[in-house]
Structures are given as C-alpha cells and as structure tokens.
Image (spheres, helix red, strand yellow):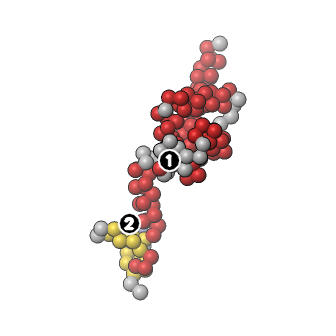
Amino acid sequence: MIHKLCDECGKMESVDFMVAIDDNIYCIECDTRKENEMTEKKYNGWKNRATWNVALHFGNCESLYYEMMRKCRQLAGEKKRWTAELAVCFVRYHMGAVTPDGCHLGDVDWDEIAVAWNDDLNYFLETQADERKKK
Ligand SMILES: [Zn+2]
C-alpha cells in the first residue's frame, strides 16, 4: 500500500484515503475542510445555498425584512431570543416549503439563521436599554 504525506497537515496516510487536487494530495479531513471553506465562500459565509437564500430574502425583500424585524422587536420585548425552532416556524409561515429561488427549507441551517437574527434582535435590546436610561 502506498502512503503519502498530506500537503496540508503533513499526516502520513494511505493514498487510498487521500484526494488529489491539482498537484497536491490531501487527507480526507483536510479535503473536507477545504471543501467546506470553499462552499462558505461561495455563499457569502453561509453554510449552504438554502441557508444563504433564506437570509438573502429576509434581508433584501422589504416585506419579509419588515416581518422579521417586527418579530425581533416582539421577542426583545418578551425577553426572548431566536432559536432554530422559532426560525423554522417563522420562515415556513412566510415562505412555505421552498424559497422563491426554489431552495428547500429542509436544507437550511436554522441555528445559523437564529444566530444572525439575534444580532438584529440585539439592536432592539440596545434601543430599549437606551430609552430606559433616558427616563
Ligand atoms: Zn491533512
């Protein structure tokens, strides 16, 4: 059995378990990581096309953005945060099973969406804190 060194991490591995790209050869772990990095770059840092697409529509479509921000304000008022479960229900309610570009909501990484939307929610929490200080 032929063994080679991974060009990325230097680990010795049987070539049967390695992947050759251009003039380099990588172990499975490094190949998987590289592929994930490339996919993320392709979708502006989002995990996959479906996740990126949901974020895109709620960020760019005026009515969806309005609904999302309204929900953020409501959650902030109730001292709640976005969770993956909450994001699924919310998006399904507004989109159905697929995005306008035909991405299946089943492929979406809801944790990633929840984290992103909690950033927007923080805006309302900060505004509320500012208003309380003023009073
Ligand atoms: Zn490696």
Does the beta carbon of the residue at mark 2 sit less than 8 Å from ligand 1?
yes
Q: Residue at x 44, y 76 (%)?
A: 17
Task: From the image, tell me which residue sits under label 1.
Answer: 102
Q: Is residue 104 left or right of residue 22?
A: right
Q: Residue pushed farthest left? A: 23
Tell me residue 40's x, y (percent): 44, 51
Within the displayed image, which quadrant is ligand 1 positioned in? bottom left
Could you tell which of marks 2 and 1 lies nearer the N-terminus? 2
Which circle marks residue 119 in the picture? none
Tell me residue 21's x, y (percent): 34, 68
Q: Amino acid at mark 1?
A: Gly
Q: Tag 1, which secondary structure?
A: loop
Residue 39 seen in this snapshot: yes
Q: Quadrant of residue 123?
A: top right
Q: Residue at x 38, y 75 (%)?
A: 5
Task: From the image, tell me which residue sits under label 2.
Answer: 8
Q: Residue pushed farthest right? A: 78
Tell me residue 10's x, y (percent): 39, 70
Q: Does residue 29 sit above or below 91 in this rendering?
A: below
- Pointer 2: residues within 10 angstroms few (<14), some, or many (20+)? some
Disc nearest the viewer among 2 and 1: 1
Q: Tag 2, which secondary structure?
A: loop
Quarter of the picture containing the C terminus is top right
Q: Residue at x 55, y 46 (%)?
A: 98
